[in-house]
Image (spheres, rainbow, N blue to C red):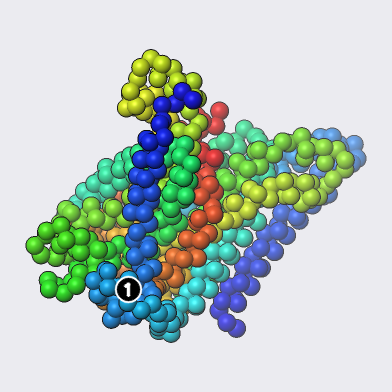
Amino acid sequence: MARAVTTQRKAINTLIAWIVGLLIFFPILWIFILSFHSEGDAIKSPLEVITSTWTFESYATVQERSNYFRHFWNSVVISVGSTVLGLIIAVPSAWAMAFVPGKRTKDVLMWMLSTKMLPPVGVLLPIYLICQNLGLLDTRIALVFILMMINLPIIIWMLYTYFREIPGEILEAARMDGASLREEVIYVLLPMAVPGIASTLLLNIILAWNEAFWTLTLTAAKAAPLTAFIASYSSPEGLFYAKLSAASIMAIAPILIMGWFSQKQLVRGLTFGAVK
Amino acid sequence: MHPAIQAVLTVGVAVIAAIAYFYLSNLLLDRVLFPARGKNAGRNINRANMIRPWLFLFPALFALCLYLAYPVVETIRLSFTDRVPGGYEWAGTSNYQQMLREPKFWEALRNNFFWLLVVPGLSTLFGLIIAQLTDRLSWGNIAKSIIFMPMAISFVGASVIFKLIYDYRPAGEEQIGILNAVYLALGGAEPQTWLTIPGLNNFLLMVVLIWIQTGFAMVILSAALRGIPEETIEAAIVDGANPFQIFFKIKVPQIMPTIMVVWTTITILVLKIFDIVFAMTNGQWGTQVLANYMYDKLFRANDWGVGSASAMVIMLLVLPILVWNVRQARKEMR
């Protein structure tokens, strides 16, 4: 091995990497620890906090006072709904661009890329007014459709890059054997694209789950998903550390677990397939 | 009916409608408009195949236009009008003039540039350093996954976490905010209300985003580092290069395109920055940014004209980076 990395040097690097890792992880860990203590214990000095009794009472109080599960289900409905709807619309588009590329395909792709980069503030007020006129403020339906639209470019791009990896000859062969377009897509393309579609699904659920700009501006108490819930929880209950910590943990835990398993997908999606 | 069930049903209907559209439009194309039989069968098949992609692209393009085209035009219009009882009134550039007179606007503009300067650079730099440190370490992968973790957290969630870290309690009481506890332990005289210290508080808000984005930069850059051909590094070692020279003169130039991807991705994110400021300081104490300034104007001051004007400013600021980025992507696509 010509690479001049000695064992000792490796050990030092590993150590530094772990220290950085723990440093970065520390805020999450600290909130986690705080959330399992009573309000009285949470305001003791850090060492005393760890040694005092561990309890679930903060979690129970948060659920009781602000109905955590309603916001949780809102998040689920909004993120899954917008993703499924987006996928249904995106699969044919991605199919068209990946397997029947035309002169304009590249332009369409670039246009989609640019729409995703455009800041949502530019369209906020008109969309807010439309929702107001249709009586859709503070409803899950409005958020499902809006999040579907804002994430559609990413879904299409992701599917497009995955579809591109599938050789077109296989589809052609199916066509030669007399498969109709519907059969070709359902029995040949989709089974091969399952990993890609699953990654897209996962990525998009995470993005929709974390979306805060639209959820903060378009929802109030009823339809608020977890992002809006935690933002509103932080001010009035800001002095109750244990409860705030419990609320934060409950808001981020589901997505943290999903994120752990989907690093690659997140990276690929957020760079529009530039990094695989 | 419970509203949540209603939402699920609506989504179901929309899904079925979308599938029906694709199925029926395709059927219409093949059976009715250009049937693959009769004397024009060959020509019909060709025509159908030309139209089909657009048929399939239509719903997506339509949805994106619905989301963009009308609202952008409407925002431009609103920025030149004032709301008067019963309607709108042409206001010329008075909204823009009023905006330019407000010190809060200039503060927001200045802070946006400050964010732009600091966050993408530092996130990329930290990401690069950690990627280099953990390159080819057998125990590095778990550490990397942990460093990546904040990436999955929403900005609002991260803000709430850091609010607790920066928390202040009066002198004499236990400091449960970690920053104050550390500050006192290191010999600081008084606990500080960190988020109200002008200048520093901006930086403390940026730390949240850097915390989130470092892992993102690291994962991408470490993949790029692994992709560097071994020979180039071996050649440099044979020529007697020291580790720093290898890093800066051999490795960094080779992964420069990836560094640019990371940098621009984070830059675009920073230009939209809203949630962190909204959740942590709400633009008080000199931490205002443009998106939150706009939110204030729209929903607190109810001044749609000035709000829309500031939205236009954000869009104009994004435009050059957007164009550059799209050009870059176009080049890469061959």
Q: Is residue A120 rendered to the left or right of residue B32?
A: left
Q: Is residue A132 rendered to the left or right of residue B172?
A: right
Q: Residue furthest front?
A: A8
Quadrant for the N terminus of chain B in the image: bottom right
Residue at label 1?
A51
> Please, what secondary structure does the residue beneath circle 1 have?
helix
| Residue B98 visible in the current orientation | no
Q: Residue furthest left?
A: B189
Give the residue drawn at x 43%, y 49%.
B143
Q: Which chain hosts label 1? A: A
Residue A131 vs residue B14, the one in the foreground: B14
Give the residue drawn at x 54%, y 40%.
A276
**Residue B40 location in percent, x, y?**
86, 36
Residue B243 vs residue A75, the one in the foreground: B243
Residue B157's quadrant in the figure?
bottom left
Q: Residues within 10 Å of mark 1 (few under 14, many from 20)?
A: few
**Residue B185 location in percent, x, y?**
16, 61
**Residue B326 location in percent, x, y?**
46, 37
Q: Is residue B223 above or below residue B299?
A: above
| Residue A36 visible in the current orientation | yes
Give the residue drawn at x 15%, y 57%.
B186
Give the residue drawn at x 36%, y 79%.
A53
**Residue A32 location in percent, x, y?**
39, 68
Residue B202's quadrant in the figure?
bottom left
